[in-house]
Image (cartoon, rainbow, N blue to C red):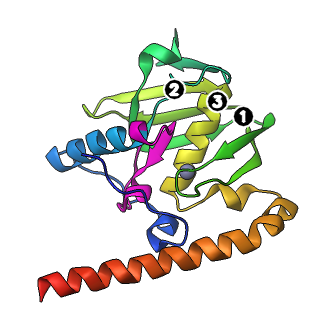
Amino acid sequence: MTLSILQYGDPILRAKGKRIDQIDDRIRELAANMLETMHEANGVGLAAQQVGEALQLTVLDVSQVEDRPSTMRLNGKEADPKTQMPLVLINPQIELSDATETGTEGCLSFPEITGAIERAASATVRAENLEGGRIEIEAGGLLARALQHEIDHLNGILFIDRMSSVAKAALASRLKRMQKETRRGRAKDQQAVSETTL
Ligand SMILES: [Zn+2]
């Protein structure tokens, strides 16, 4: 089942995700729905906050991106990123390299907005998978960037927070408008819910 993707202005996008202590049917179903939602939206990553759940859960898939390569080591061994996708990461912890790289990013919660974001060139992520096993991913290229973007979401951090102040100032009025529209839409949704429950 595809889920609706929350847009900038929704307060859940600013919530820090709760640690997942037990991987039960609800988490498995949420992860499956998030994968379906991400693929349908042609995204390379989706965090639980973006579908309204403040949890330490994210899904990624860089296998369809041809022009921005990724490198990956999985549990200490060289791995082909394409065959390891999609990834479902639970309670991820990230360690960043000192070297940085600037690249273009977009976000499913910010339709039509992209920006140049400076991030660590490589990253190591330790997480649990859906089976509860521990995995370690050392990533470079697009996968490193996507992991940082998604794990930021899990902590309530958005890519606009990492834009230069000049870029952010240029987007200010669009962001304000988006925030307003999201809040108005949400107020309407809540009204609809209360009307049907009455
Ligand atoms: Zn995003």
x, y percent for residue 51? 38, 57
Quarter of the picture holding the C terminus: bottom left
71 left or right, relative to 63: right
The residue that label 1 is drawn on is 97
Badge 2 amino acid: Ile
x, y percent for residue 64? 52, 23
Residue at 13% in and 83% down? 197
- Magenta extent: 39-58
Q: Secondary structure at mark 3?
A: helix
Quarter of the picture holding the N terminus: top left
Badge 1 amino acid: Ser
Q: Is residue 23 visible?
A: no
The residue that label 2 is drawn on is 137
- Residue 45 within the segment the image draws in magenta: yes
Residue occupying the far right of the picture: 166
Q: Is residue 117 visible?
A: yes
Badge 3 amino acid: Leu
Q: Are marks 3 and 2 in contact (CB under 8 Å)?
A: no
